[in-house]
Amino acid sequence: MVLVWYPKCTTCQKAKKWLDDNGINVETRHIKEENPSYDELKEWYEKSGLPLKKFFNTSGLLYKSMQLKDKLPTMSDEEQLRLLASDGMLVKRPIIISDGVILTGFREKEWEQLK
């Protein structure tokens, strides 16, 4: 199981603490130092069953400065995935990648399935 996170992010810190408190061992990956690739993002998106928008950090400064709220609806999935792969700060975090389960953001109720 891999936790893709940004250690300075308070939500990511809460997620890591929750994993630790529940005895769930994860390999961590710093999203800014090791941004997910296009191929990884495409695989996670397809396996997750989530809308592609759920992979965007919509509250992030970069997302807002690029005015992506207005641009994403006109972009293809490929264009969106390439954009996500260009900068880790555009990617919603934390992301947990496990066998058959991909979750974006930290909602404890959803993460219960990891136990």
Image (cartoon, grey):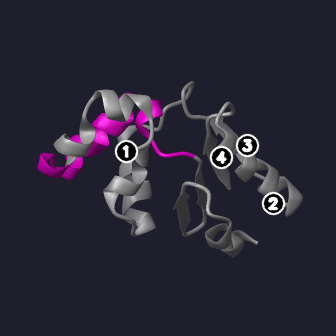
For residue 113, which quarter of the picture?
Answer: bottom right
Q: On the image, numbered disc 3 is attached to which residue?
A: 13
The kind of residue on which mark 2 rests is Ile
Name the residue that disc number 2 marks: 24
Q: Which mark lies nearer to you, 2 or 1?
A: 2
Q: Is residue 36 above or below residue 105?
A: above
Q: Nearer the viewer, mark 2 or mark 4?
A: 4
106 above or below 110?
A: above
Tell me if 21 is positioned left or right of 8 in this view.
right
Look at the numbered disc 1 and give the secondary structure of its residue: helix
Identify the residue shown where x is 15% and y is 46%: 75
Secondary structure at numbered mark 3: helix
**Position of the N terminus by quadrant:** bottom right
Q: Say which element carries label 2.
A: loop
From this view, report whether residue 33 is shown above or below residue 7.
above
User: Reading the chain from its start, which is encountered first: label 1 or label 3?
Assistant: 3
Say which residue label 4 marks.
11
Tell me which amino acid carries mark 3.
Gln
Tell me which label, 1 or 4, sits earlier in the chain: 4
Measuring 43% from the left and 46% from the top, which residue is drawn there? 40
For label 1, the crowd category at 10 Å Cα-Cα, with few meaning under 14, some 14 to 19 and many 20 or more, is few
Write the residue at 54% across / 27% down.
32
Please provide the residue range marked out in magenta: 73-93
Residue tagged 1 = 39
